[in-house]
Amino acid sequence: MKYDVIIIGTGAGGGTIAAKLAPTGKRILILERGDFVPREKENWDTEEVFIKARYKAKEPWIDSKGKEFHPGIHYCVGGNTKFYGAALLRMRKEDFGEVQHKSGTSPAWPISYEDLKDYYQEAEEMYSVHGERGTDPTEPDELRSFPKEPLAHEPRIKELFDDIKRIGLRPFPLPIGIKSQEHNGDAPLVLDRFDGFPDPTETKADSHVVGIKRALEFPNVQLRTNAKVSRLISNPDGTKIEKVEVTVDGNTFYFEAKVVIMACGAINSAVLLLKSKNGRYPNGMANGSGLVGRNYMCHNNTAMLALSKKPNPTKFGKTFAINDFYLSGDDEFRYPLGHIQMLGKSDPVMFKSDAPKFTPGFTLEMMATHALDFWMTSEDLPDPENRVLLTSDGNVQLRYRENNLEGHERLKEKLKWILEHVGCETHVLPNNIYLGKKIPLAGTAHQCGTARFGIDPKNSVLDTYCKAHELDNLYVVDGSFFPSSSAVNPALTIMAQALRVGDHLIQNIL
Amino acid sequence: MKHYDIIIIGTGAGGSTLAYKLSRTGKKILILERGDFLPKEVNNWNPVKVAKGKYRPKEKWLDKNNGEFSPYTHYWIGGNTKMYGAALLRMRESDFGEVKHYGGVSPAWPLTYDDFAPYYQEAEELYKVHGRRGIDPTEAPSSKPYPYPPLRYEPNMKEMASNLKKLGLHPTPIPIGVSLPKDKKRKNARVKLSLFDGYPDPTESKADAHVVALNKAIKKKNVKLKTNHTVQRIDTDRTGKRATEVVCTIKDGKECRYSADIIVVSCGAINSAKLLLQSKSDLHPQGLANSSGMVGRNLMLHNNGTVVAISKKPNTSKFQKAFLIPDFYNGADDSKLPLGTIQLMGKTDPVTLKDELKQINPDKEFDVADVADHSIDFFITAEDLPDLNNRVEVTDDGRTKLVYNQNNEEAYQRLRKKLVSLLGHIGCTEGYCKDNAYVGFKLGISGVSHQNGTCKFGTDPKKSVLDLDCKAHDLDNLYVVDGSFFPSSSAVNPSLTIIANALRVGDSLSKNIKR
């Protein structure tokens, strides 16, 4: 069967570009290896979601030492956005240039913030982002306002927000993508399950709800679920993808299209390219540079819990962030530290596995009612040895060695310092207790970098419109193209670039 | 004071449906609801919190002995339908006539089934009922199929149905009002129903009055909704023939008034009666529209109860509300007179189940979760008969008092026995708990979800409160549109009849307005 466009994957990149291309009337086939996440009561069941990993891929990968692990990855319509926290931030203007970090250089992007600016705005509109311009001290310039007013802080969070302001910092409303109430007949949604949970009410702006669903309203768009692409087949010259090989229930099908857009997520897009090696591309499709799978980045992320003496009855705590240390720590350390944001409220079930030993005298229930939840992101730097590989038996191997940790450690110290100065001391416990948990290898939520874009085909996989340098009709629009990871959640940048590529395809290709 | 063409008080099955119907007339409509929107939140699906009354009002009512109880009622946009099981059945044709019961006579309605039939169809379409005609031998005739095919039985429900069929019974898919993605052509995420009856639905798949009716009405510019407005009184003009304004209290106890040409009371049979009674004045000393003395009388609640059968085999069903057994509606081999309806229901919540297990065996420690995994839950309904002495009263300090003595209990007991006799055929004789194949209880006075009858309709103003259009005989412009108008209660869930009647009244009102 012949299509104009095949899109492989329905996450932030695929879902967004599908919605962008749908109105063109072109015949579009969307292939998704997973199925829809059913809307069911388990969606909001912490035990099912976090402990039993009900919705995670059952696929074991192996680490650099050959040991199996289960990646925190989701194969479903909407991809990882179905489970994301919808924190949708633009990269800083500085992130597009070269940035000096303590342990190395974060390379410049081949495009500037200006190239992406309009698409950031378009992505914010599409994902209904709630925020307030002019409040984030490091935000890039933008005169147009956010499409939606910032979400209101709940009382305990507002108090914390004000306390942090009082010590001289500039906390700001965290931009969140959520469909707002359309008219006065809508019942309010209490966001007491958000980060990490699918949303059965379909209010969270994920790429299923705002991307795929909208695309499917057009008769020229078709979606196949449970359709895993096993291989891309090029013509003998290797100038174009001729066929997409798809496995459905053990049966193999082939589809053809003028344009093939991969959006499997940075890891799986690299895997698919590597798997699709042939005579012309012995190291993997589009991999003349040898860079496919390399420079894997996933951020230095830490979730931290502060136990405050004051109870925190908050339902949805994710309403502010702190970027005061984004570009520079302090006089002692003039390198970037990273980004701090609040998380949705933790609940006792989440602590079950590892918490009690840290917290004598604190029950899980007490922890949950007193916890303030933070998330910290610092940039990790591209390293060609941090890479996605295929083992000889076809397994996915993720080799990753952390780097640039000092900024991240200092960011944690900054947060502790903040908390000590805003009344999070507790007299119940001898010391403040912070449960910091660095997200391990399995934390692939911020994956990027595995097919970086650039001008020079020798040191990049994709051109600046995310087309493979070596092929005329192959595009990759997930986090793969990132030459550096910045220190904000990558989702909005993936969406914006997908819109930019979509625009380019509409104007010049289709 | 703001003036409207129509004020509707209450947003349950009657009020919301009527609002939907009238919204298309372009008339200025004000809808007043004492409650607020029920938030979509994690606790919607928390069986313990819901069972303990998270979504019920704090209000306590009084029983006939002035004992306090917490009524099983809900003050939210959508009223009790927000928590209902959306079992949307038509009354049987015979229910519209006079029927002899063990406990007396169920009186005839002043209208026939044929008067209601087209509105039943409209109601089924509006509330997206999934069902199949032609299986239930007692069902009333209809010219069109259900708008959607029945929900599929899960494997053990299917097995049970086939076992019952072998006995010559006619298990019939419960007609359920629900909107599912599969009903539409477009590909979408599945909705897996599980906690349903007794729970609000954050996915808004359940066809409740808020989602399917009110929401459409208030999208129209001519319709205004005010939440957290509790109507305390309806005042009339000096002739007493026209209701002129409603007096509400809002959150901080402040009072506000609105006037209208037409006022519709849709507070549910109990609260509608209460509102009329507490609107008494010199011109209406017994309560508004109560020259007959019938307001609040003939309260019916059904003989409702549950039987939780404990099966040997685990019950894997997520959505257990699969079929009903209609075969004993008009009687049985050993019972000449009508018994009622048996239907499957959602799983009994752990709090209630624990209480029931304690009652059958106080000394034994049950693993409630394990019992729940083996339970099959039935809901049985037998008709209760109108009795002038079963009534809603308002005490001097303004509280709600229900004077109610259950009648026609013999039908209920016989029906229950019938069900119990069937349990052996569905793997529940030597039950999981050895001595007891089942637990269960009869709903007491607090089980008011099927409330009806408190302002019955009829042709004689001396014997009825409402005329055939559900307008108060005593006033020119006051209507009551909820379960109040029922002259008899039948033995099916009342909501579809309330909805159909709201559409019928809406039709007649729309015509009058145009004139």
Image (spheres, coloured by chain):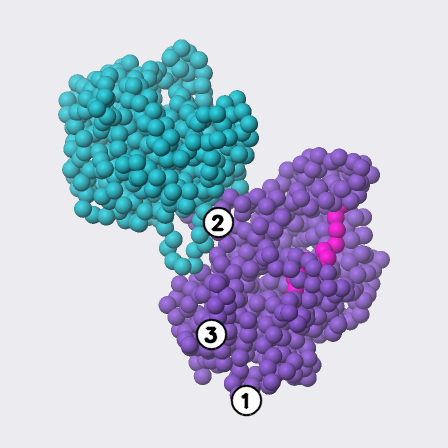
Chain colours: A cyan, B purple
Q: The residue marked by circle 1 belongs to what chain?
A: B
Mark 2: few, some, or many residues within 10 Å (few <14, many ≥20)? many
Magenta residue check for B450: yes
Magenta residue check for A297: no
At mark 2, the secondary structure is: loop
Q: The residue marked by circle 2 belongs to what chain?
A: B
Q: Which sits earlier in the primary sequence, circle 2 or circle 1?
A: 2
Image label count? 3
Q: Amino acid at mark 2?
A: Lys
Residues at circles 3 and 1 in contact by the CB criterion of under 8 Å: no
Residue beneath label 1, please? B239
Q: Amino acid at mark 1?
A: Thr
Q: Please state the extent of the stretch shown in magenta in the rendering.
A: B437-454
Picture quadrant where residue B317 is located: top right
Q: Nearer the viewer, residue B508 or B258?
A: B258
Q: The residue marked by circle 3 belongs to what chain?
A: B
At mark 3, the secondary structure is: strand
Identity of the residue drawn at 52% across and 60% down: B35
Q: Quadrant of the C terminus of chain A?
A: top left
Could you tell whether A143 is left or right of A204 in the image?
left
Q: Position of residue B172 (x, y in %)?
A: 66, 53
| Magenta stretch, overall SS | loop
Q: Nearer the viewer, residue B492 or A286?
A: B492
Residue beneath label 2, please? B40
Residue beneath label 3, please? B257
The numbered disc on residue A340 is none
